[in-house]
Amino acid sequence: MSTINILSRNTKRAPLVTGGQLSYRTVLLPVARVARAYAMYAANPRFTDVSMIVSPTSPNNGYVTFRPSNPECAERMIEQFSDDRARRAQTTLDNALTYEWDSNPDGSEICYSPKLNKATGEITYDAYTVSPTSCDCADYQYRCRRLNVQCKHQIAQSLRRQEGL
């Protein structure tokens, strides 16, 4: 039963990009559970590039990274990764919490991305420089850029331009 729990919790984890490829990673687990999860993924032929990593900030904990061995599954992962960002961009545009935009002289735009503090109800904004080919948000810099996928800010910018705004 604990093996099933490890699998179901781990596969819901957001993907990460390593070496230009999309991988999954488990939640942070105690080292003993990491070793069991590693053995389980490594023994399963549906997974490849299985690694056990001890957390540098919490040496008693770690996680396992893995990729699907089937190239079609790996491609679906990238498509899902891109679709998730498109869905997030559209949801943000549809909600009352919309982005605010300012133009830069170089043709890029500043996107003010809202963040809602659920405890206080206060809305604050993070500012990102966005163009069709880049964004300085962490999601684009650490994940999307390496996969040649647009982040939600770039998608929102594209949707906004299509609407003539």
Image (cartoon, helix red, strand yellow):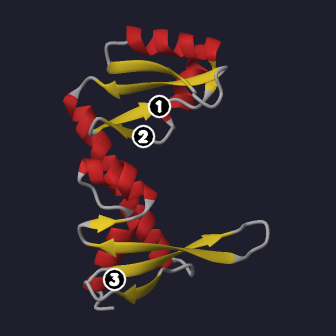
Q: Position of residue 19 (x, y in %)?
A: 29, 35
**Mark 2 to mark 1: distance in Å?**
6 Å
Q: Position of residue 164 (x, y in %)?
A: 28, 91
Q: Is residue 98 above or below residue 49?
A: below
Do the numbered discs 2 and 1 sit on residues whose CB atoms are within 8 Å?
yes
Q: Secondary structure at mark 3?
A: helix
Residue furthest out toward the bottom: 165
Q: Earlier in the sequence, mark 1 or mark 3?
A: 1
Q: Tag on residue 38?
A: none
Residue placed under numbered mark 1 in the picture: 25
Residue at image point 66% right, 77% down? 123
Q: Secondary structure at mark 2?
A: loop
Q: Is residue 10 above or below residue 32?
A: below
Q: Earlier in the sequence, mark 3 or mark 2?
A: 2
Residue placed under numbered mark 2 in the picture: 15
Residue placed under numbered mark 3 in the picture: 160
Which kind of residue does numbered mark 3 sit on?
Arg
Q: Position of residue 99 (x, y in %)?
A: 48, 80
Closer to the camera, 19 or 6?
19
155 left or right, relative to 8 = left
96 left or right, relative to 47 = right
Residue at image point 53% right, 25% down? 63
Which kind of residue does numbered mark 2 sit on?
Pro
* Crowd rating for badge 2 (residues with CA inside 10 Å; few <14, some 14–19, many 20+): many
Which kind of residue does numbered mark 1 sit on?
Arg
Q: Earlier in the sequence, mark 2 or mark 1?
A: 2
